[in-house]
Amino acid sequence: MKTKLKTIELITLVALFAAVSLASPRVCRAGQAAATPSPTPEVEEEKKGPFSGEVGTALTNAYIFNGLVQDKDTFIAQPYLTVNLTLYEGEGFLNDVSFTLPLWASVHDINLPAPTGQSNKGWFEQDISPGFSFTFAKNWSFTISDYIYTSPGDYFPVSHNLSLAFE
């Protein structure tokens, strides 16, 4: 039991450390600017790179998926990481093409019986959802992605779900 909690704590701390270390450097420059005022304010053009993303961890005591209670009354850490890559930007009919790779996990101090022979009992779920997004005519977008639900703890079989969105 203590080993599981230490693993969950370690995963949570790593995700939180990653979130802090990936924070925008603008915070530091803003502090420097406040400490040393300049006679003429400089406007720095922010260069947008092809990569962006998000990292974090949610902490909870219940996991409910599509209205169904998967686990409750336990400590649950749900770290996530999303990486976005802009493949194309333009002014014509097609304005933007991007690739996104969201990763999400749910690690539990689980109160369910262990699946036979599994050593990953606390790793309830690991999801990956690669997809492409296309923006056209500046106001419309089409997204296609594959939601892949896996359970390293062997609580359910792998599931692929195609998602198509037009907005």
Image: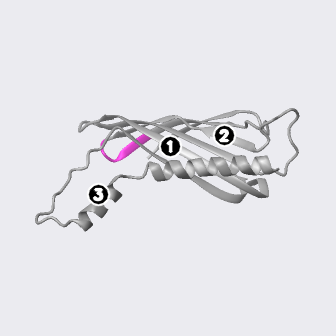
| Residue type at tag 3 | Arg
Q: CA distance from mark 2 to mark 3?
A: 37 Å
| Nearest to the observer: residue 35 or residue 45 | 35
Dot 2 or dot 1, earlier in sequence: 1
Query: Please, what secondary structure does the residue beneath circle 3 have?
Result: helix
User: At x 36% / y 40%, what residue is drawn?
Assistant: 135
- In the rendered structure, the answer to whether residue 30 lies left or right of residue 72 reads left
- C-alpha span from label 1 to label 3: 26 Å
Residue labelled with disc 2: 126
Question: What is the magenta range?
Answer: 137-142
Q: Residue at x 43, y 40 (%)?
A: 84
Which of the 4 image quarters holds residue 41? bottom left
Please give the label number shown on residue 29: 3
Residue 88, percent from left and from top: 32, 33
Q: Is residue 4 above or below residue 43?
A: above
Q: Mark 2 vs mark 3: which is more N-terminal?
A: 3
- Whichever of callouts 1 and 3 sits on the residue coming sooner in the sequence is 3
Amino acid, disc 2: Gln
**Callout 1, which amino acid?**
Thr
Q: How far from the left and from the top, in percent, is residue 4?
A: 77, 47
* Label 1: how many Cα within 10 Å (few below 14, some 14–19, many 20+): some
Farthest front residue? Answer: 36
**Any part of residue 55 in sight:** no
Residue 71: x percent and y percent? 78, 53
Q: Secondary structure at mark 2?
A: strand
**Does residue 89 appear left or right of residue 122 in this picture?**
left
Secondary structure of residue under mark 1? strand
Residue assigned mark 1: 82
